[in-house]
Amino acid sequence: MSRPFKSVETRHEEEREGVLRALRGLNRRDFMRVSLGALQAAAAANVLFNPHSFCPIRVVSGAEGTPAEGFRIAYISDSHLYRKELNDRFVRNLLRAVDDVNALDPQPDFVLYGGDLAQLGQKEELDLGARILRGVKAPVRMMVGEHDWYLDLGARWQELFGKPHYSFDHKGVRFVVLNSVVEEDFWTARKLTPMERMQTVAGLDNGKQNPFTVGAAQRAWLEKDLGGLAPGVPVVVFSHSPLYKLYKPWNFWTDDAEEVQRILGRFDRVVVIHGHTHQVLTNRIGNIHFHGMLSTAWPWPYAPQGLPELTVQMNRPDPFNPGDGCGDGTVRVHPDGLVDKIYALWNRNPMTVSRAYMTSGGKKDAPPRPGSPSY
Ligand SMILES: [Fe+2]
Ligand SMILES: [Fe+2]
């Protein structure tokens, strides 16, 4: 008789349940032995074992663990889920990120999902992602990526998550979520099928697609949305692509970036947090501080040209260490609206790109430079 099919989430949940059951069945002496073993293993790897999660997590020492003014949010990004029959590693990685943010104590005020939840915009992929993200304890704010959009031009994503651009106020900060992956129609004239269109956009370095934009309609909306705010109000913008021009051949680029920056230019302090580049990436243009997010699926190499001066590159990922160079993270939002960006890299020490580093133009509080080359 064939065994019943079990989804990867079911198996993951069963494994966790099994460990919990086994722990409950241990007598005190065995429990102490298991606990000591786990602690020794964690200490050897320079990680702390969080009792609320079966994923060992690295913790940031010092300021991260102490009560502070301002507030904290968390992020998960770029999970690129295939259907689970095709790739369950990426599914497990997203589950790991959900465990990480659920284990944060105190909990973040909300969790930003940074886009590219799906790999090819398929209903099964988006539905699977939505189901997994329902396991996040804190409220989740969604952002769209190009991999979510170009199969059905956002139809399923919007059914699940609503509008791709919106704003909200939280503790004195105006947060804005943009859809920065708007592309002009390159598919109709070429008579591409929806899947051909999706695969063209998903291929980062093909020459057929158009560059990403925020687009005139959304820029007009943004200007109006921010219109009533005084220049001193802190503004934090979430975009999938970086809102500057880094490297066009890979679409690490937003074509109308300068126009968006002009709208943001009248504020004293603006932070832009973006996905898409799957790496530690830091930039500053005038009053705007830019921070990239890690991916849970894979790290991209650094662009061969144009890397912003403030970026301290993360180490080259170890190909034999699954999940290395991936991760999730948190953002400490200070009362002035500027942030410390914490990269919770899996299997490594975390990296913090602090407000002081950004405001001093890299002179103060620089993150430790890695000992080996990036790419
Ligand atoms: Fe991505
Ligand atoms: Fe992307």
Image (tube, helix red, strand yellow):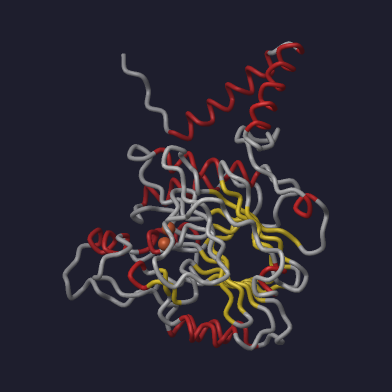
| Figure disc tally | 0
Q: Where is residue 292 in the image (x, y as percent from the top left)?
A: 54, 63
Which residue does the image show at 60% across and 22% down from the upper left? 19
Q: Where is residue 54 in the image (x, y as percent from the top left)?
A: 61, 32
Which residue does the image show at 33% across and 54% down from the upper left? 120
* Residue 305 located left or right of residue 49: left
Q: Which quadrant of the rendered structure holds the C terminus?
A: bottom left
* Residue 63 located left or right of residue 223: right
- Report the image quarter containing ligand 2: bottom left
Which residue does the image show at 58% across and 28% down from the upper left? 16
Q: In this view, does 232 lie above or below 168?
A: below
Q: Position of residue 276 (x, y in %)?
A: 45, 62
Residue 85: image quadrant is top left
Q: Which quadrant of the rendered structure holds the N terminus?
A: top left
* Residue 276 located left or right of residue 345: left
Q: Position of residue 210 (x, y in %)?
A: 30, 75
Q: Between 35 and 192, which is closer to the camera in this rendering?
A: 35
Residue 368: image quadrant is bottom right
